[in-house]
Image (spheres, rainbow, N blue to C red):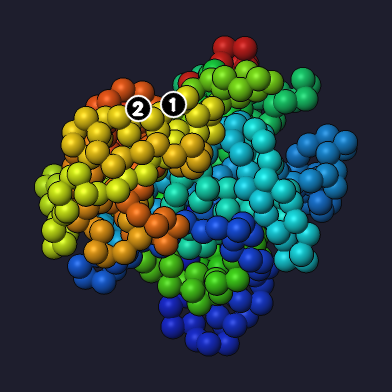
Amino acid sequence: MAGAAALLIIGTAGAGYLYYRHLNGNLQKSALNLGDHQAPKPTANAAGQTPLNILLIGSDARDTKENQKLGGAKSTFGGTPLADVQMLLHVSADRSNMSVVSLPRDTVLKIPKCTDEKGKTYPATGWTLANESLGRGGAGCTVATWESLTGIHIDHFMRIDFSGVVSMADAIGGVPVCVDANVYSHTHDGHGSGLKLKKGTTSVKGQQALQWLRTRYGFWPDTDVVRTKAQHEYMNSMVRQLRKGTKLTDPGKLMDLAEAATHALKVDNGLSGKSLYDLAGELKKVPTARITMTTMPNVNSVRPGFEEKVDPKAGDADKLFAMIRDDTPLDGKGSKKKPAEKVSKDPAAPKGDIGITVRNGTAGDGGLPSKGRAGEIATLLTGQGFSRAVADQTLDPQKNTEVLFPSADLEGDAQAVAKALGVPLKSAKKSTQVTGVTVVVGSDWRTGTVYPKSTADDGKTPDSANALHGDDKSACMHVDPAYTW
């Protein structure tokens, strides 16, 4: 969203300590993660570099006169804010590429337990909409929800509301956007954004930019998913506009951008005026052509009561998240050479001497567990000579199948079991939560005796992610004929 522009404020270099302190005073801050657990931080590459993950959150809060004037019925004024825009911005460890993943507002998921900074606890939810996380303690609960869903560690968040988008858009200046027909997202039905544009390319700013980012009814097929596509078109165009224009070299205009951004944003406690500048410098290293916008692959929800919403698409969504976790470029320009798996120096014991416990973790995707799954895999192992493999009735939900071991002297045994099952050797992991070699059969292997081969390592972004690259100037929103004029 427009929060990404804050990362492009690179002209305050050399402004000095006093100016950075001034910018820092503009920022509103809160805790990064309000959940009980955090996704593990990524390991550094050979050069000691690590990826950077920033969650951009667009709030629909009607908590000020400015926000109330810009959108929503009076019945929504002062209500619980919703995270209607959620985008994960991933910058690769070597800063050669950047990926953005949007989570549709209408995604059905489970929100983890969150505790706000005043000590109020919000218990974990059943199936609910992704945008409700913001109202359960703040942006730190939205971060916790993302980490729970994706397994991706988030370093920072930036939150912006309606009036913030308008002020940022004004400071940026016009951003060219395209529609393939005249469009009017009329508001008489209570749903439209008010956007009215002629066919072709128009430069939008201020309130009109906000209308573009909010438009759902007007862009075919009038879904929250297609709205993310419009937001991607705007962001790519904004980046191109900023980089080719004068704003990044004109000190006065850059100061205006810096002031607008720091007044508009609410950020985590780890960010400051100076660190925003540092982040911008990191993003400047990424060529426009290597910026890739995507939407989480999704399908119509099968959850009772959520038939008009969406679920993550099995396989494709997991693959997209895995590519981000593994720092795989979404533009397909990553290394084609698959790294060799690390084989333990600890020799494996004879198969018949290895004690193995098998647990059923197939409910890791939020569905019901596959009945008898632990027994099926235990039988598969005994048939291969692991005579001490037994099924444990404990349910241990997790998304990916893993072979856990408690100490280094059992690593070789765990890798032998992983190899026998056909799961990647990297799935053999040390864990203090087990007392012996333990297989947890994840939701990625619900049926059958042959582990499904993952395509996450092929370097190809799923088609269902609707990738849009930063240098693609052909993007143009398709207008619903019911909203033309």
The percent coordinates of residue 226 (x first, y second) are 52, 27
Quote the CA–CA distance across marks 1 and 2.
Answer: 6 Å
The percent coordinates of residue 6 (x first, y second) are 52, 61
Look at 57% across and 87% down and name the residue there: 18
Tell me the residue that label 1 is attached to: 372
In the rendered image of this protein, does residue 220 appear above or below residue 411?
A: above
Instruction: Pick the residue in front: 217 or 96.
Output: 96
Residue at disc 1, secondary structure: loop
For disc 2, the neighbor class at 10 Å (few under 14, some 14 to 19, many from 20) is some
Instruction: Pick the residue in front: 20 or 365.
Output: 365
For disc 1, the neighbor class at 10 Å (few under 14, some 14 to 19, many from 20) is few
User: Label 2 near label 1: C-beta < 8 Å?
Assistant: yes
Instruction: Pick the residue in front: 336 or 78.
Output: 336
Look at 42% across and 46% down and name the residue there: 100
The percent coordinates of residue 143 (x first, y second) are 57, 54
Q: Quadrant of residue 359?
A: top left
Toward the right, the furthest residue is: 75
Tell me the residue that label 2 is attached to: 376
Residue at disc 2, secondary structure: helix
Amino acid type, residue under disc 1 in the picture: Gly
Look at 77% across and 20% down and name the residue there: 189
Left or right: 243 as drawn, with respect to 198: left
Q: Which mark is residue 214?
A: none
Toward the bottom, the furthest residue is: 17
Toward the top, the furthest residue is: 481
In the rendered image of this protein, does residue 399 appear above or below residue 40?
A: above
Q: Quadrant of residue 455?
A: top left
Look at 61% across and 22% down and name the residue there: 303
